[in-house]
Amino acid sequence: MPYYDYDKEVKFEELEGEVISEINGLDKGSEEITIKTNSGKHFAMYHNQDCCENVFLESFTGSSDEIVGEAVTHAKVVTNEENPVDTDPELTEYQESFTWTYYYIRTEKSSLSLRWYGESNGYYSESVDFVWVNKPEEEDASN
């Protein structure tokens, strides 16, 4: 997994108004998803691994094909530390701490919902990071 500069963390809402040109890593169990936009922005969703935690894409609904080429009208993130009723019991049976992070992307035509699962012994972060792989000012400086 690549290392991303933590100083480049941005709010997920940065996607609003952007036209998505590409999404990679959208697979159950994925530890990283990258999103590119027509304006040249390149974002990554991943977990900055510390030690003894596990964070991955547990499930998703929708299709990247349906939102690529469309402007994002709404981007929202919600976290929850409760065990959802529809969770596979084997997934959370032995965990001391867990966090669900839900990402919602909506366009005029469709939507995509991502459900990330993070687990640990309670001492480590279970969060998902959303960062710029390239900040816009870096793009301008290279031209």
Image: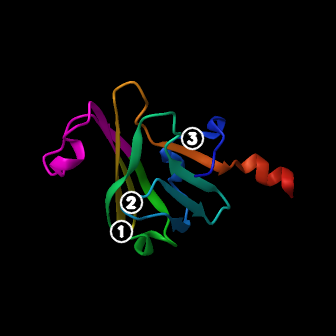
Residue that sits furthest to the top in the current view: 123
Q: In which quarter of the image is residue 100?
A: top left
The image shows residue 42, relative to residue 54, as above or below, that is below
Q: Is residue 88 magenta?
A: yes
Depth check: give the residue in front, 94 or 78.
94
Nearer-the-camera pick, 105 or 16? 105
Q: Where is residue 136 in the image (x, y as percent from the top left)?
A: 72, 50
Task: Give the residue at x 50% y 53%.
Answer: 16
Label 3 to label 2: alpha-carbon separation: 18 Å
Q: Earlier in the sequence, mark 1 or mark 3?
A: 3
Q: Mark 3 is on which residue type?
A: Val
Q: Is mark 2 on a helix, strand or loop?
A: strand
Callout 1 secondary element: loop
Residue 117: image location, x then y, percent: 33, 46
Q: Do the residues labelled 2 and 1 touch (CB within 8 Å)?
A: yes
- State which mark lies toward you, 3 or 2: 3
Which residue in the structure is indicated by mark 3? Answer: 10
132 sits to left or right of 32: right
Q: State the residue position of label 1.
A: 110
Q: Which residue lies furthest to the left in this view?
A: 85
Q: What residue type is labelled 1?
A: Ser
Q: Give the range drawn in magenta.
A: 77-101
